[in-house]
Amino acid sequence: MELGNISQPAYGPGPKAPGSSTPGLVGMVHGFLQLVQPNDLPIGGCTAVGGAGNELLLYELGFLVCMAIGLLFIILVPLVGCCFCCCRC
């Protein structure tokens, strides 16, 4: 097994979708992940000082938007359901 250059690793494209008996579901999941997080991981990650906060924020922006929409639904759906149940006009 050859390790290559450990101090300067070379990253390739992302992993391929595994073979599955449900290719439609696998395609839908990979499409959602590409929609939520289209950007590559910033080089340097959390160790870089200075602009690393902005890069990581842009990297995680899709997940933050999905989390905000999810929290909105968690709060609004029971509230609207309670209004429909209590105020049947």
Image (cartoon, rainbow, N blue to C red):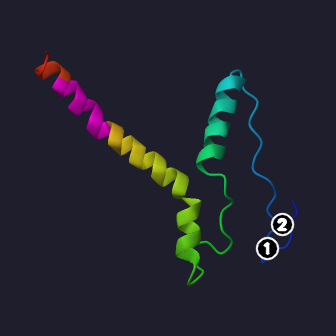
Percent across and percent down for residue 52 are 57, 76
Quadrant holding the C terminus: top left
Q: Toward which corner of the image does residue 55 lie, by quadrant?
A: bottom right
| Drawn side of residue 21 relative to residue 81, left or right | right
Between the C-alphas of marks 1 and 2, the distance is 7 Å
Quadrant holding the N terminus: bottom right
**Of 12 and 80, which appears nearest the observer?**
80
**Of 47 and 32, which appears nearest the observer?**
32
Look at the image and say whether residue 80 sits in the magenta stretch.
yes
Percent across and percent down for residue 2 are 88, 64
Q: Toward which corner of the image does residue 49 lie, by quadrant?
A: bottom right
Q: Residue furthest front?
A: 89
Percent across and percent down for residue 73 are 34, 37
Task: Give amino acid for label 1.
Answer: Ile
Bin the neighbour count of mark 2 within 10 Å (Cα to Cα): few under 14, some 14-19, many 20 and up.
few
Look at the image and say whether residue 86 sits in the magenta stretch.
no
| Drawn side of residue 64 relative to residue 34, left or right | left
Chain part drawn in magenta:
74-83
Q: Which mark is residue 31?
A: none
Q: Which mark is residue 3?
A: 2
Task: Mark 1 and mark 2 in contact? Answer it, CB < 8 Å.
Answer: yes
- At 31% from the left edge and 38% from the top edge, which residue is drawn? 74
Magenta span: helix, strand or loop, mainly? helix
Residue 16 drawn above or below residue 1: above
Residue 77 drawn above or below residue 15: above
| Drawn side of residue 28 relative to residue 50, left or right | right
Q: Secondary structure at mark 2?
A: loop
- At 51% from the left edge and 51% from the top edge, which residue is drawn? 63
Bin the neighbour count of mark 1 within 10 Å (Cα to Cα): few under 14, some 14-19, many 20 and up.
few
